[in-house]
Image (tube, rainbow, N blue to C red):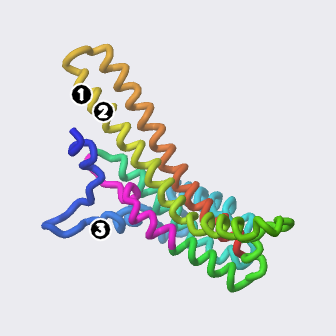
């Protein structure tokens, strides 16, 4: 039972070679592009959503922070499409792997922090010691603020991993219960199947929300350092 429950989180292989890289490169191929002067409704809706998301995230940034707009928009599209593709049957979700989420979170967090230390080092160092701190508490507060700064990328990665993994496990358990009850009690099966449909709709929303939250937090880290 445990093996079947967590089998979907094992990185797939093709002829003994890891296929994770191919899966990561697949979502961008699904994003439609157009070379025509007049776009169709799908392209128009896609561009409207991208502009709306970019405008909302970049509104609080200065000129230097807005140079990250393309990277942040690409990040939210990548995470959202990867999460949504992972809801398909017999598919693999790379964002359930903590290592991949750390590989996204650490460079973006480090880039924002390094930019802050390069552009306004006084303000960056001021975060380690709030104004008006009593002298005996200075060493403790510096240690606490340093730990809170270093734990930010881990919090980003763990939040995304935990939310996506929990949803997949819950869907797997309810789906298994639906199959088990189908030969025992039909009314109970219909009730559980309805719950499964509602949970699937909820997971679609969670997949989009988690992509937005991940990108928004990276944007906030950038705003604090620019």
Q: Camera-side residue: 84 or 166? A: 166
* Snapshot quadrant of residue 119: bottom right
Give the numbered dot on residue 22. Answer: 3
Query: For the C terminus, which image quadrant?
Result: bottom right
Q: Camera-side residue: 134 or 167? A: 134
Q: Using a 10 Å C-alpha cutoff, classify the residue at mark 2 as few (fewer than 14 neighbours), some (14 to 19) or many (20 or more).
A: some
Residue 59 drawn at (x, y percent): 73, 64
> Which residue lies under the disc numbered 2?
175
Q: Could you tell me which secondary element the residue under label 2 belongs to?
A: helix
Q: What residue is at 48 percent from the left and 71 percent from the top?
A: 35
Q: Main secondary structure of the magenta part?
A: helix
Q: What residue is at 43 percent from the left and 34 percent from the top?
A: 199
Confirm or deny contact between disc 2 and disc 1 (CB under 8 A): yes
Residue 167 in the figure: left or right of residue 205: left
Q: Which residues are magenta?
A: 90-106
Residue 6 in the figure: left or right of residue 34: left
Q: Using a 10 Å C-alpha cutoff, classify the residue at mark 3 as few (fewer than 14 neighbours), some (14 to 19) or many (20 or more).
A: few
Q: Could you tell me which secondary element the residue under label 3 belongs to?
A: helix
Confirm whether the magenta stretch covers residue 67: no
Q: Using a 10 Å C-alpha cutoff, classify the residue at mark 1 as few (fewer than 14 neighbours), some (14 to 19) or many (20 or more).
A: few
Q: Earlier in the sequence, mark 3 or mark 2?
A: 3
| Disc 2 to disc 1, C-alpha distance | 6 Å
Residue 158 drawn at (x, y percent): 48, 56
Confirm whether the magenta stretch covers residue 95: yes
* Snapshot quadrant of residue 55: bottom right
> Which residue lies under the disc numbered 1?
179
| Disc 3 to disc 2, C-alpha distance | 28 Å
Give the numbered dot on residue 141. Answer: none
Q: Camera-side residue: 48 or 202? A: 202
3 vs 2, front mark: 2
């Amino acid at each position: 039972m445990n093996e079947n429950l967590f089998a979907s989180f094992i990185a797939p292989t093709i002829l003994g070679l890891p296929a994770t890289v191919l899966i990561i490169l697949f979502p961008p191929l699904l994003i439609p592009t157009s070379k025509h002067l007049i776009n169709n409704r799908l392209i128009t809706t896609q561009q409207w959503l991208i502009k709306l998301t970019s405008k909302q995230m970049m509104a609080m940034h200065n000129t230097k922070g807005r140079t990250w707009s393309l990277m942040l928009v690409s990040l939210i599209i990548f995470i959202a499409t990867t999460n949504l593709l992972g809801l398909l049957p017999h598919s693999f979700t790379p964002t359930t792997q903590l290592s991949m989420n750390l590989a996204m979170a650490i460079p973006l967090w480090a880039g924002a922090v390094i930019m802050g230390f390069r552009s306004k080092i006084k303000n960056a160092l001021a975060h380690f010691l709030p104004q008006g701190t009593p002298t005996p508490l200075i060493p403790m507060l510096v240690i606490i603020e340093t730990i809170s700064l270093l734990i930010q990328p881990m919090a980003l990665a763990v939040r995304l991993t935990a939310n996506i993994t929990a949803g997949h496990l819950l869907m797997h358990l309810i789906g298994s219960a639906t199959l088990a009850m189908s030969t025992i009690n039909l009314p109970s099966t219909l009730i559980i199947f309805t719950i499964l449909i509602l949970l699937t709709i909820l997971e679609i929303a969670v997949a989009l929300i988690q992509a937005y939250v991940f990108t928004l937090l990276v944007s906030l880290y950038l705003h604090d350092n620019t």
